[in-house]
Image (cartoon, rainbow, N blue to C red):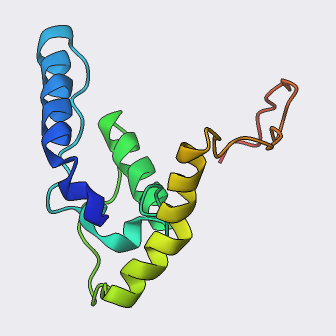
C-alpha cells in the first residue's frame, strides 16, 4: 500500500514461502492469499498504510471467522465497487510528511512510537461475558 512496498516485495515473498512451509510441514493453517482481494484496496488500510482501517478489520475478522468454520457471507474478500481514491504527488507528500518523517525521526533518535505512552489497562482485569447474541 506504500511506495516502500516495492522495496520489501522480495522479503514478503520469502516470508510467504516460510508460512507455506509451516502449513505444509506442521499443519499450521496457511495464510490467506491476498492477491486481488480487499486487502489490496487502499480503503482497507488506515492513513498510515501500515494498519487496517475499520473496513480492513471487519474483513479480516470475517475471513478469520470463515477460516474457523463460521458461516459468513460470500464475497467478503472482494474489492469494493467504486473508484479508489487517487494517489497524487500531493497525497504521497502528505503521507510522507505525516507518517514516514516522524517514523524516521524516531528511529534516528533511538525513540519508539510507544515511548511516553501509558497502557490503557495497566492492571489485568477479569473478562466478564456479556449477554449471548
Residue 70 in the image: state x and y as whole percent.
Answer: 38, 41
Where is the N terminus found, in terms of image quarters?
Answer: bottom left
Quick check: 3 left or right of 100? Answer: left
Front-lying residue, 30 or 19: 19
Q: Residue at x 64, y 46 (%)?
A: 113
Q: Is residue 75 visible?
A: no
Front-lying residue, 54 or 118: 118
Quick check: 114 left or right of 51? Answer: right
Front-lying residue, 113 or 36: 113
Quick check: 75 left or right of 98? Answer: left
Which picture quadrant has residue 10? top left
- How many numbered markers are drawn? 0
Residue 121 in the image: state x and y as whole percent.
Answer: 84, 36
Does residue 92 sit above or below 63 in this rendering?
A: below
Does residue 45 sit above or below 128 in this rendering?
A: below
Residue 94 in the image: state x and y as whole percent.
Answer: 48, 80
Q: Residue at x 28, y 58 (%)?
A: 4
Which picture quadrant has residue 14? top left
Amino acid at each position: 500500500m506504500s511506495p516502500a512496498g516495492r522495496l520489501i516485495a522480495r522479503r514478503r515473498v520469502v516470508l510467504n514461502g516460510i508460512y507455506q512451509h509451516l502449513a505444509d510441514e506442521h499443519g499450521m493453517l496457511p495464510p490467506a492469499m491476498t492477491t486481488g482481494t480487499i486487502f489490496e484496496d487502499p480503503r482497507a488500510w488506515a492513513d498510515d498504510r501500515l494498519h487496517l482501517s475499520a473496513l480492513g478489520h471487519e474483513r479480516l475478522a470475517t475471513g478469520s471467522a470463515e477460516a474457523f468454520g463460521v458461516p459468513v457471507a460470500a464475497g467478503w474478500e472482494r474489492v469494493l465497487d467504486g473508484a479508489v481514491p487517487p494517489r497524487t504527488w500531493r497525497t504521497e507528500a502528505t503521507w510522507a510528511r505525516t507518517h514516514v518523517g516522524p517514523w524516521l525521526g524516531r528511529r534516528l533518535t533511538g525513540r519508539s512510537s510507544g515511548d511516553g505512552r501509558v497502557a490503557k489497562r495497566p492492571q489485568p482485569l477479569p473478562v466478564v461475558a456479556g449477554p449471548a447474541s
